[in-house]
Image: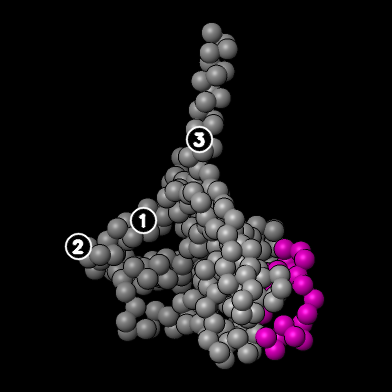
Amino acid sequence: MKTTIALILLGYLIFISAANSTSWGESEVADPLLPGETCKVREPMSYGSYIYRWESKYDQVFWPLIDMEGIWHCEKSGFMALIGDFELNPEEALRIKTFLDTHPAAPVSRADKLVRLDALYALRDKNADYRNIVSRVLARQYQSMKDYETANQYRAEAFAAFEGILAQPDLDLAKRAQYLYLGVNYARQFGQMALSEDYERRLSIVMTDAQGTEAEYFIEYIRELLPDSQYITPDGPLDPELPETGPETGG
């Protein structure tokens, strides 16, 4: 009987692990700086919707971007970017080549790679939304290294851009809800509780407006996450400590 129970428990644990696992495969992509050269990279092979329940949901950035494998690196040219973001216009390519020529040392450590990634994105022609995503990815990466000070510096950088993004007249409801939700979280992270409450008030209006629209499914996801936000405390890691009887955090 004990053996049977042990086998059942083992099978259950294996099932749970597999149900929340991700995997990578080897691939090659063209080096955007060296014509004819390729870069060895990793691409997602398997994952599920559980990635949207992992703690990075509080920053609204998700696997594979939160994994170091999700940062592609070309060893020959030195170019780096988030997974799939390898299209450069001529001006970007020139700026990056000039930078790499004057900063030839290859990044070795994880921290080195993050610093290089940030430096290269500063030379890219990206819109405000994408730049915000990069800042939040860097915040989550540094948090996973327990460098909370640097993580929150990137969050502060992202936070400062929220209102400019929200002011865009063509911003769709799902994206508007996402930034308002982030405003709820980041305002609390920086001790601005009244501002957090204002973001939540604005978010509730968008939630109502989204009923019956294409954004409704995403809005429901945000609605499920929102109760966790009340447990966010200033500084340190963004992930709130939830009471045992509190809202379910997912993966």
Report whether residue 156 is seen.
Answer: no
Instruction: Look at the numbered disc 2 and give the secondary structure of its residue.
Output: loop
Residue receiving disc 3: 16
Residue at the image point whose x is 39% and y is 79% from the top:
166
Residue 194: x, y in percent?
46, 70
Position in image of residue 54 (x %, y %): 51, 51
In space, the residues marked 2 and 3 are separated at their CA atoms by 35 Å
Which residue does the image show at 46% across and 67% down from the upper left? 182
Tell me where residue 156 appears, x and y as whole percent. 58, 74
Residues under numbered marks 2 and 3 in contact, where contact means CB atoms less than 8 Å apart: no
| Residue 103 seen in render | yes
SS category of the residue bearing label 1 = helix
Q: Is residue 48 left or right of residue 82?
A: left
Residue carrying label 2 = 212
Secondary structure found at label 3 = helix
- The numbered mark, 3 or 1, whose residue comes first in the sequence reads 3
Amino acid carrying label 3: it is: Ile
Q: Which residue is mark 1?
A: 221
195 vs 145, left or right, is: left
Rendered residue at 57%/68% (across/down): 29
Q: Distance of mark 2 from mark 1, alpha carbons?
A: 15 Å
Q: How is the image coloured?
A: one colour
Q: What number is the disc on residue 244?
A: none
Q: Position of residue 101 (x, y in %)?
A: 75, 85
Q: On the image, which quarter does residue 73 sit in?
A: bottom right
Disc 2 versus disc 3: nearer the observer? 3
Q: Residues within 10 Å of mark 1 (few under 14, many from 20)?
A: few
Q: Furthest-top residue in view?
A: 1
- Is residue 99 within the magenta segment? yes
Residue numbers of the magenta segment: 97-120
